Image (spheres, grey):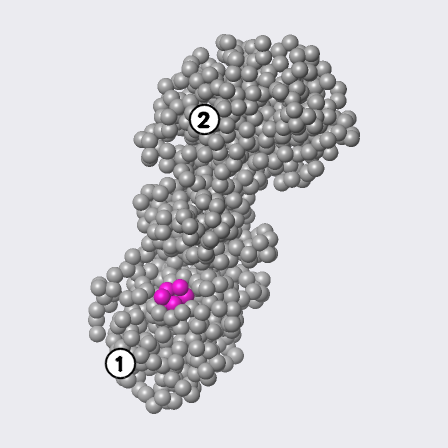
Amino acid sequence: MKPLSAVGIVGYAGYIPIYRIKAAEIGRVWGTGCKYPIIEKAVAAIDEDATTMAVEAARYAVARAQINPEEIGAIYVGSESKPYAVKPSGTIVAEALGISSQLLAADYEFACKAGTEAFQTCIALVASGMVKYGMAIGADTAQGRPSDELEFTAASGAAAFIFGKKSEETIAYVEGTHSYSTDTPDFWRRPEEPYPSHYWRFTGKPAYFKHVLSAAKGLMEELNLTPDDFDYAVFHQPNTKFPLAAAKMLGIEEEKIKPGLLVPIIGNTYSASSPLGLAATLDVAKPGDRILMVSYGSGAGSDAFSFVVQEAIEWKRPLAPPIAAFVNRKKLVDYACYTRYRRKLRK
Amino acid sequence: MSSKVAIVGVGCTKVGEHWDKSLRQLFLEASLKALEEADVDRVDAIYVGNMASATINFQQHLGALMADVMGMRGVDAVRVEAADASGSAAVHQAYMAIKSGQAQTVLVGGVEKLTDARPADVEYAAMMSERSEYVVYSGITIAGLNAIQTQLYMDRFNARYEDIVNFAVNDHRNAAGNPYAQFPFPITVERVLESPPVADPIRLFDTTAPADGAAALVLCPLETAKKLCDTPVVIEASVLATDGVNPYERDDVLTLTSTRVAAERAYRTAGITPRDVDVVEVHNTSSIMGVLALEDLGFVEKGQGWRFVAEGQIALNADLPTNTLGGLKARGHPWGATGVYQLVELTWQLRGEAGGNQVDGAEIGLAQSVGGLGATTVVHILRRWH
Amino acid sequence: MSAPAVRREIPYRYRLMGTKCLNCGALFHPPQRICPKCGSKDLVEEELAWRGRLVAYTVIRRPPKGYEDYKPYIVGLIELKDGKLILAQIVDCDIEEVRPGLKLEATFRRIREDGKSGIIEYGYKFRPVIEWNWQKKPNPEK
């Protein structure tokens, strides 16, 4: 899918909460072996949720975009851990940023790819001329059932991207996007259930890999590109192994995915996972670099994007904190504090 | 217009946990004592001081309710609210009613019944004296606000917490001789410092505890008072002053401007200076508030209050006997009743009825009652009539 | 908790909107229509500074109703860069490391919630300033 007129990222930023828990600490409680899918994961504080983190990322994205927030005409927040089941998060973000009420806003859900769906909506709205700027946010305080494998990785974070017509102000423009979706029940959560369920190794080959690879290949075919044309790649990061394996299967060198591979040190931030990876990659990219990004949402689908970095990255980058600032800002908590912060204690 | 207003009867309940008594019963008990002492059956008006009956006891309309309880249907009766200065604000209204000639004999009672709610609800109700949407919103408590005052005071005046808390120690020492006190036992500075932290640096033994209690006064013009009793006590001044509710938008966070303003007017009205005062009651939700009160009432220079307290100059036998029957800390702090308790206790002192805690030759007493962190201050000056 | 009352406070809670007296320069948060300091009615809306430093603090260990889940928590008196004093919770900061002089910035957090089914109240708290420096490239490869 290519937008009819050229669109790009005019501002981006991420937010990662300060607390971390080591996978080994979770393993200590449940007597798991010594091989963990990641090193540590980000834990939102007790007073944080997907919406507060969305606001933090959005504020920095506006600062980096150097635009008047009143010109943002659309906000889409992708999350599977909305603080309200019914009531939009986007309106809260808009009020916090002082965005005009002449606003399109909705929350998206598609497991871990809700954030990139928001990308596509904003790209389309800008390309069609319906809005001047659109903001897409992926934000989650993902929860894993205590003792479940997911508990090692389910983490908290947010990333916000502002899209506008391609110009000198554009940090990276969109070459195209391609989605691939099927009815694949590898992971789900029923209403009123606090924790998601998943079908073990079924989440791998028929789910993650099939969709990620299909979307990536579809995009490259559509844009007439090969893996070698990309300087960087970002894949959805449910654990350390999957994105590395996906890159290998596509023939993309590991070095190209390293800058955006945050999962070992912050965990799987669900809707924020690939957007945060993209943000971290933009933090190091040079003008002219081409970036492949492929999200994955269980249930299942993948959105692939190709971005080309422009000169504006150089002067806009210092206007907001790099992802590394959040990665390095951390306080370790033990399992007891973690259960308290994530409201797992029954009162 | 009446020339002077006098206190002709006083009464109170013990401050504490009255599990078997309601708001109404507490008010009745204290009021009957005051009316019996004054030998009065019926009054022209009733003023009820209360802070939290709506949130704690689910009861409003205390004027009519207490008139009914007292068997005085038909009487002019109303509740007065000014946070934890409600009791003294009610006395101020009663004083003005007599001064204006509208009423001849007035019953004024302060009553609070806090043990009908859980501690967290009581903390929340206490915070209703502060700006709800912004100060309460921060999650701070009264002890927390006092803690910040304490920290600022220690920083600015180079004081130590262990010096400041001598105020609480003084209260407890005095309460030991008061049969109506909530905590009638002495404590040491060490005991305060070893008690659990409530809002750092403030410790549990430097805070007030939820309490029930009622205190009442019967007031009338001095001319009538002389016929009713041998030892009338005259209210020489009754002044209420306000300040910004947000303590951090005042001119100085460590000055209780409402206290300064009320005290200056009260001294002028009574024709006295701070030096003439023999016995003082101040509003110490924590020691810091007592220290600030002594400074802003003009008894000691700003920044020197902690030293004055640490040196023992507020003890019963010292320069300025303060909170002679236990103060907020140890007599107890049943919010809307506290201001009336202060005046009951000063009346005892001026009549020479304070027992083992009697201040020799006490002629003039001053009471300072504060709403919240100083948005309201009521100052009363009482004098023994000869 | 009242949903209409919470909504009314949004500009002051989400964006630190206050008022400034054009006559005496005093700042007020929440806004005042008439200046309590000089009596002037000439006030304009003004957003407060988002950064400041900690002047004094306390640790609330016996919280009021609605704040029990968060205890113990730090409440600080903050002097913003525009000189305004503001009271707020300090987050992302251990009790052991909080100290007067700490540089702080506003953050957007949950304040309290009306049980499991009621509304969530959001607003400002403060955290230690997140420092960053682009001179040091986070990943110099390529």
Q: Position of residue B285 (x, y in %)?
A: 49, 31
Name the disc covering residue B308, or none. none
Q: Secondary structure at mark 1?
A: loop
Type of secondary structure dominating the magenta stretch: helix
**Chain of the residue under the numbered disc 2 shown in the image:** B
Chain identity of mark 1: A
Q: Where A153 sits versus A313, above or below?
A: above
Mark 1 touches mark 2? (CB < 8 Å): no
Write down the region rendered in magenta: A58-63
The image shows residue B355 at horizontal and vertical percentages of: 55, 10
Per the image, the residue denoted by label 1 is: A288
Instruction: Measuring from the top left, give residue A99's x and y in whole percent.
Output: 46, 67
Q: Magenta includes A173?
A: no
Q: Residues within 10 Å of mark 1 (few under 14, many from 20)?
A: few
Near mark 2 (Cα within 10 A), the count class, few <14, some 14-19 or many ≥20, is: many
**Amino acid, disc 2:** Leu
Nearest the eye: B143 or A34: B143
Tell me how far mark 1 sits from mark 2, CA to CA: 73 Å
